[in-house]
Image (cartoon, rainbow, N blue to C red):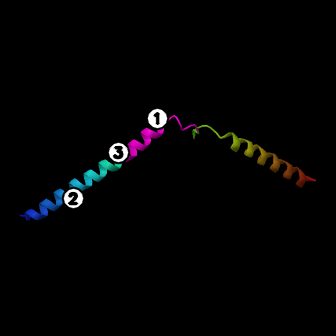
Amino acid sequence: MVSPWMTNVVILFGIIVAIVGVVAYLRVYKNSAWSAASPSNSHRTDQPNEELIQSAEESAATRHETLEDDKI
């Protein structure tokens, strides 16, 4: 038979792990709920940034000009 102090240590360890797990889950859930509900989040990641589109078009134009210069 296992000594009672060992049983108590294992039970206490399980309780501590459960509490830490619940706290970690609630932190993640709260952060995701706040980020989804906040109206101040005007920059959405699923829509392209206009500045990035313009810079991509400029770099594409520059590459095209460079290729044209290489042909000469």
Real-space CA distance between mark 2 and mark 1, rounded to the nearest whole angstrom: 36 Å
**What kind of residue is marked 3?**
Leu
Residue visible at 8% across and 62% down in the picture: 4
Left or right: 27 in relation to 65: left
Q: Secondary structure at mark 2?
A: helix
Q: CA distance from mark 3 to mark 2?
A: 20 Å
The residue that mark 2 highlights is: 13
| In the displayed structure image, the side of residue 35 where residue 26 appears, left or right | left
Closest to the observer: 1 or 23? 23
Q: Say which label, 3 or 1, has the lower sequence index.
A: 3
Q: Amino acid at mark 2?
A: Phe
Question: Is 65 part of what is drawn in magenta?
Answer: no
* Residue 16 percent coordinates (x, y): 24, 55
Relative vertical location of residue 14 with respect to residue 29 in this rendering, above or below: below
**Position of residue 14 measured from the top left corner of the image (x, y, whole percent):** 21, 55
Query: Residue 63 location, x and y as percent?
Result: 81, 50
**Which circle's residue, 2 or 1, is located before the other in the chain?**
2
Mark 3 near mark 1, Cβ–Cβ under 8 Å?
no
Q: How many marks?
A: 3
Q: Secondary structure at mark 3?
A: helix
Q: Nearer the viewer, mark 2 or mark 1?
A: 1
Quadrant of the image for the N terminus?
A: bottom left
- Going 25% across and 51% down the picture, which residue do you hit? 18
Magenta part of the chain: 25-42
Seen at 57% across and 37% down, the residue is 42
- Which circle, 3 or 2, is nearer the viewer? 3
Are the residues at dot 3 and dot 2 in contact (C-beta closer than 8 Å)?
no
For label 1, the residue is 37
Q: Would residue 51 be found to the left or right of residue 28 on screen?
A: right
